[in-house]
Amino acid sequence: MNTPFHGLPQGTDRIVYVRPVAVADLPDEVREQIVGLETIYSVHGADGRQLALVADRNLAFHLAREHDFAPMSVH
């Protein structure tokens, strides 16, 4: 059975990966802009390119969907 599912953008180029990042692992100039958080979330393209850093996981997923990407969690 081959039933198309239209809930996700077509093609692997529309998938992004969301993963947690320890603020302590970030460069100094980025850490200086982050106050009160130990972990933020990074959104990466399928090619591994970092597209965004955001304060929480829900925001990362929302941002991806707003731009017609299908977000996937990476642990």
Image (tube, grey):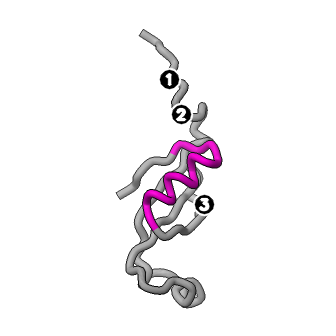
- Secondary-structure class at tag 1: loop
- Relative to 1, residue 58 above or below: below
- Relative to 31, residue 48 above or below: above
Point out residue 9 in the picture as x, y percentages from the top left corner: 59, 34
Of circles 1 and 3, the one toward us is 1
Residue drawn at 61 percent across, 48 percent down: 66
Whether the residues at callouts 1 and 3 have beta carbons within 8 Å, the answer is no
- Kind of residue indicated by mark 2: Leu
Q: Which residue is mark 1?
A: 5
- Relative to 31, residue 41 above or below: above
Q: Which residue is mark 3?
A: 49
Q: Earlier in the sequence, mark 2 or mark 3?
A: 2
Q: Say if the magenta span includes residue 51.
A: no
Q: Which residue is mark 2?
A: 8
Where does the magenta region start and end?
Answer: 56-70
- Relative to 58, residue 29 above or below: below
- Kind of residue indicated by mark 1: Phe
Q: Is residue 25 left or right of residue 13?
A: left
Point out residue 21 in the picture as x, y percentages from the top left corner: 43, 71
- Secondary-structure class at tag 2: loop
Q: Residues within 10 Å of mark 2 (few under 14, many from 20)?
A: few
Whether the residues at callouts 2 and 1 have beta carbons within 8 Å, the answer is yes
Of circles 2 and 3, the one toward us is 2
- Kind of residue indicated by mark 3: Arg
Quadrant that contains the N terminus: top left
